[in-house]
Structures are given as C-alpha cells and as structure tokens.
Amino acid sequence: MIYLNLFLQFFHIGLFSFGGGYATLPFLYHMAETQKWFTTQQLTDMIAVSSITPGPVGVNVATYAGFTTSGILGALIATTAVVIPSFVIILIISKILEQFKSNKHVQAAIYALKPAGCGLLAAVGIDMFANNINTPGMAFLLLLFFVSKHKKHDPLFYLGVSAIFGILAGFLHLTT
C-alpha cells in the first residue's frame, strides 16, 4: 500500500509543480508534515544533496525521498511518478505546439503562474532559512558574503569552502 501512496503523492507533485525542481519543495514540505515519511530536516538534507548532484533537482529529490521512504523500489516508484506527468504533457504539447504558441489564453496562464511560482519558492526559502539558522552558519554566511564582495573567486571556490565548513561543522556538531 505504501508503494501506491508513494506513487500517487509523487505523481501529484509532478502534475502540479510548475517552474522546475525547486517548485516541488512546497509539496515535499507538506508531504513531510502529513505523511511522516521523512522529517523536514531530512528534506533539507535531501535538497542540499540533490542540488549538488547531476540532474534535475526535482527528480533527484524524488529519488532520494523515495529511497528514504521505501528503499530502492521506493526510489524507482517516486522517480517514475514525478516524471510521468511532465513526459505526457510535453508529448501532448509537442503534437499541438503551433496552436499553443500564439494562444493568448495559454500565454496569460503562464504569465500568471510565474509570480505564483516565485512566491512559493520564496516561502520555502524563508522557511528553510528559519528552520536551519544557527550562529556558526550565520557567521560563515556573512564572512563569505564579505569575502565575495571584496575578492572575486570562481563560484566553485565558495562551494568548496562551504562544503569543507559543513563537513567540519557536522563533525564538531556546531549546527545542532
């Protein structure tokens, strides 16, 4: 029964999240609260790992969440379920693309969805920030911000330094 529920939850996410992988986050936070398959802290970790691994963030998070919930089969089910709606929709749209391209109603719907997606992403960003704020992390954030304003480095430099800080903070339990 958990596999069917997992499929339906991620199919719902795939069907109704517009705007890329990060647009799935409000649905995933809701899932964490209602299904109790994973905690919001685990979801934050899933997002972090999914953001740095190759591939679409939404698919990566679905795979990770499915695995956390129900192992390898759960990962396959969640990944398949989140991808199916997009695949079918793109298949249908590709067949009638010319009609959609100039349709004023479709353009109006897309125009209206953009701010809604931005609002959902902002809400998740604020929630993630509020739930994960800690003194060492804030100090490090401010330090990196100051350094980046005065010394231009490749973004990978900042990513690497942040990864090292995160690993050290985890070993030293600075963020708990």
Image (cartoon, rainbow, N blue to C red):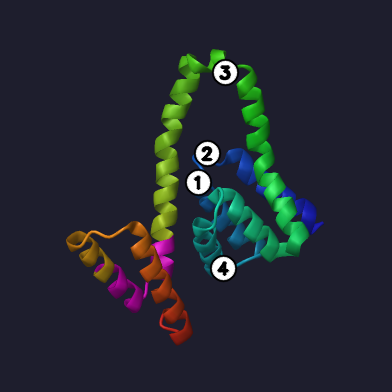
Q: Nearer the viewer, mark 3 or mark 1?
A: 3
Locate residue 116, reporting x and y percent: 43, 39
With 143 as the anchor, is 169 left or right in this view? right
The reply to whether the C-beta atoms of the residues labelled 3 and 2 are less than 8 Å apart is: no
Helix, strand or loop at mark 2: loop
Q: Amino acid at mark 3?
A: Leu
Locate residue 21, reporting x and y percent: 53, 47
* Placement of 169 over or under 94, stated as above or below: below
Question: Which residues make up the magenta segment?
Answer: 128-142
**N-term mark: 2 or 1:** 2
Question: Is there any visible trace of residue 176 in the rendered image?
Answer: no
Q: CA separation, marks 2 and 4?
A: 23 Å
Binning the other alpha carbons within 10 Å of mark 1 as few (below 14), some (14 to 19) or many (20 upward) gives: many
Q: CA separation, marks 2 and 1?
A: 6 Å
Instruction: Choose between 65 and 108: the one closer to the eye.
Output: 65
The reply to whether the C-beta atoms of the residues labelled 2 and 4 are less than 8 Å apart is: no
Locate residue 57, reporting x and y percent: 54, 51
* Mark 1 lies on residue: 23
**N-term mark: 1 or 4:** 1
Q: Amino acid at mark 4?
A: Gln
Quadrant in which the N terminus is drawn: bottom right
Tell me the tag on residue 116.
none
Q: Nearer the viewer, mark 3 or mark 4?
A: 3
Residue under the point 20% across and 62% down:
151
* Mark 2 lies on residue: 18
